[in-house]
Amino acid sequence: MLFSLPMSGAVAKDTGYIFVSSENDNAVTVLDGKSHAVVKTIATGERPRDMKLNAARDKLYVIASNSERVDIIDIAKLAVERSVDVGEDPEMFDISKDGSRFYVSNEEDAKVSVIDIAGNKVLAEIEVGEEPEGVMISPDGKKLYVTSEVANMVHVIDTATNEVKANIVVGNRPRRFAATPDGSEVWVTNELGGSVTILDGVKDEIKGTVSFAPKGFRADDVTPVGITMTRDGKTAYVTLGRANHFAVVDVASRTVKDYVLVGQRAWGATLNRDESLLFVVNGLSDDVSIVDTRTNKVIKSVPVGRVPHTAVIDD
């Protein structure tokens, strides 16, 4: 079956495409949003991982860790238009509120690089704990949160000065973030702690913990990594890694409402725009589970590339 591809920026937005980065294929797989058939496979740098859309939603930014760059994909052309150098062993990133800078975790260097996107140059390097991974700009853009997997710490950085203003010890091997819409709570997954630590987004201190214990799994198999939160801040979805489930968490009460079986090593989690569907990336079964959020039932599993990392929905 042939699919017509958008040929100009005028029709590049809201294509419905599902983009999935595949670490072992050095590519991004593009799926049709309705049929879930593969539309195209876009070659990238080596080991593509984290991905984000720009504010205009006409470009897709893709970290290529082993190539030490971010590839910029033109969604209208479904091709890499240029690349931005971002330092050694980049893993995760976020974008400044004005869209001009990348904040990139450089795992081997124990630094966060601040990158001028247009100028393709390093503006600053911020020293953090060993093996930084998760990177998130606060909803108001004033803070940058960074996890250090080895130090079991979250670093809180002032984006105006690039200075570390707080170091918060959390659970064992913290990975990724989600925040409530007002920034009052920041949730961080602890991969080897089997939990999420909840931070006070104003006071920069711990205010709670949610632990996970799906039936039939030993504690060391419960490895939370991915997390996403609904726009109203009421529900969080947390992928549990080797436990092959994700958890549905009520944010206000901090209680687990459900555990849902998906693929092997559930890793990333992404909601579509109307939040009717959750896309769970399964790193060891090479597929994406598509979940109806009204029922918390998997409606389809879609094969993608080898060792998929992140999904982004252009809807």
Image: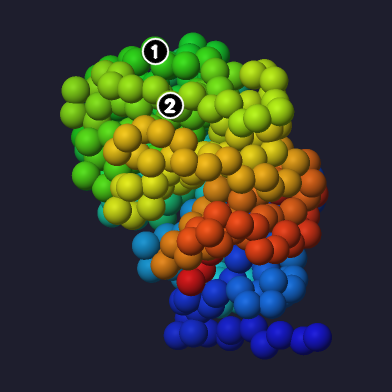
Is 59 placed above or below 202 here?
Answer: below
- Discs 1/2, front: 2
Examine the image and state in which quarter residue 279 appears: bottom right
Examine the image and state in which quarter residue 212 appears: top right
Q: Is residue 160 left or right of residue 129?
A: left
Q: Position of residue 200 (x, y in %)?
A: 25, 27
Q: Nearer the viewer, residue 94 or 38?
A: 38
Q: Nearer the viewer, residue 278 or 270?
A: 278
Q: Secondary structure at mark 2?
A: strand
Q: CA distance from mark 1 to mark 2?
A: 16 Å
For label 2, the crowd category at 10 Å Cα-Cα, with few meaning under 14, some 14 to 19 and many 20 or more, is some
Q: Is residue 287 left or right of residue 54?
A: right
Check disc 2 and give the amino acid type.
Val
Check disc 1 and give the amino acid type.
Val
Q: Position of residue 307 (x, y in %)?
A: 76, 45
Is 275 placed above or below 249 here?
Answer: below
Is 312 placed above or below 153 here?
Answer: below
* Residue designated by label 1: 169
Is 164 placed above or below 18 here?
Answer: above
* Residue beneath the point at 74% across and 62% down: 302
> In the rendered picture of this protein, how many numbered marks are placed on residues?
2
Examine the image and state in which quarter residue 67 appears: top right
Q: Secondary structure at mark 1?
A: strand
Q: Is residue 241 left or right of residue 129?
A: right
* Residue designated by label 2: 210
